[in-house]
């Protein structure tokens, strides 16, 4: 009976229904506005990473706001590069899992790495400037001598060093069978070839090559007899030791002379 009355829209008064609820039944617009206000009042809660059950157990780096990168990493301003790397690796391992802490540690490490790179670059520039200044202040004969010297790429230096070291080893291995005449001839031919590549003049290359061989052989003949026999293998002859000195002069002439 009561359900039929409610569906028909008639007014119902009962002791079991509160007057406020009856008013809501009479005014449906009012009930709709009230439900909207309630939905606006109760907003859903947002959970951050710090509120997560596992986020609270991750340690936080306490020096994220320290401006000095040395103090932030906990090292001395005079720390070496190895100490900087060790401090960075230790802190990253200790505060692993906390993104802001890792960013702060990496930022301090990058600042120190960049400053170290700038210092090394300035040192190289200062060294080149000092060498250039000393060359300019040197006597005229030294300037003229330095005009014949150049510094080739390091790979070229190592390749030629390997070649003449191989010739020296070959001469030592064959010292029991005969003298190093063949190895000396091959080394001289290689020296002339390398010099001809640089100077583009076969005559100049031959002159420098034979000159280097002559000076090397002469210096070896003077220096080797002064060395005590206790430091020399008894099976090595004077000719062999002199040829080793000549290899050094041939290497220097074809590598560093213009």
Image (spheres, helix red, strand yellow):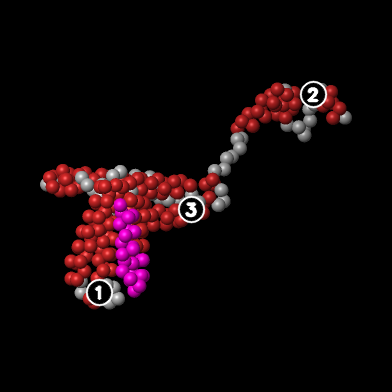
Q: Secondary structure at mark 3?
A: loop
Mark 2, residue position: 11
Question: Residue 70: percent from the left, percent from the top?
Answer: 33, 50
Residue 257: mark: none
Decide: marks 1, 2 in contact (CB < 8 A)?
A: no
Position of the N terminus, as image quadrant, is top right
Which residue appears at 20% of the width and 47% of the height?
146
N-term-proximal mark, 1 vs 3 = 3
Number of the front mark, 1 or 2:
1
Please state which of residues 219 and 23 is positioned toward the viewer in this rendering. Answer: 219
Kindly indicate the quadrant of the structure image that contains residue 247.
bottom left
Q: Using the numbered discs, state the Cα–Cα distance from disc 1 to disc 3 in whole angstroms.
A: 59 Å
Please state which of residues 80 and 101 is positioned toward the viewer in this rendering. Answer: 80
Number of the front mark, 3 or 2:
3
Label 3 CA crowd tier, 10 Å (few <14, some 14–19, many 20+) = some
Mark 3, residue position: 96
Question: Residue 67: percent from the left, percent from the top?
Answer: 34, 44
Label 1 CA crowd tier, 10 Å (few <14, some 14–19, many 20+) = few
Q: Secondary structure at mark 1?
A: helix
N-term-proximal mark, 1 vs 2 = 2
Which residue appears at 57% of the width and 43% of the height?
47
Which stretch did the figure color magenta? 169-192
Number of marks in picture = 3
Residue 231: mark: 1
């Amino acid at each position: 009976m009561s359900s039929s009355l409610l569906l028909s829209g008639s007014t119902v008064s009962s002791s079991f229904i509160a007057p406020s609820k009856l008013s809501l039944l009479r005014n449906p617009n009012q009930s709709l506005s009230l439900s909207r206000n309630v939905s606006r009042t109760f907003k859903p809660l947002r959970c951050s990473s710090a509120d997560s059950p596992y986020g609270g157990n991750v340690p936080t780096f306490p020096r994220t706001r320290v401006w000095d990168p040395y103090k932030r990493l906990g090292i001395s301003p005079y720390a070496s590069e190895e100490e900087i790397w060790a401090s960075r690796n230790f802190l990253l391992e200790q505060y692993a899992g906390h993104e802001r802490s890792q960013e702060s540690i990496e930022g301090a490490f990058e600042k120190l790495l960049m400053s170290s790179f700038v210092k090394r670059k300035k040192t190289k520039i200062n060294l080149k400037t000092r060498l250039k200044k000393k060359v300019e202040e040197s006597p005229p004969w030294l300037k003229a001598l330095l005009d014949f010297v150049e510094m080739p790429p390091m790979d070229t230096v190592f390749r030629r060093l390997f070649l003449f070291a191989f010739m020296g080893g070959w001469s030592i291995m064959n010292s029991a069978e005969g003298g190093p005449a063949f190895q000396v001839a091959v080394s001289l031919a290689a020296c002339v070839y390398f010099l001809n590549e640089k100077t583009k003049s076969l005559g100049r290359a031959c002159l420098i090559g034979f000159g280097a061989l002559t000076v090397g052989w002469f210096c070896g003949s003077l220096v080797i007899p002064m060395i005590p026999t206790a430091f020399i293998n008894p099976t090595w002859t004077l000719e062999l030791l002199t040829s080793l000195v000549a290899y050094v002069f041939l290497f220097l002439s074809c590598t560093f002379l213009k």
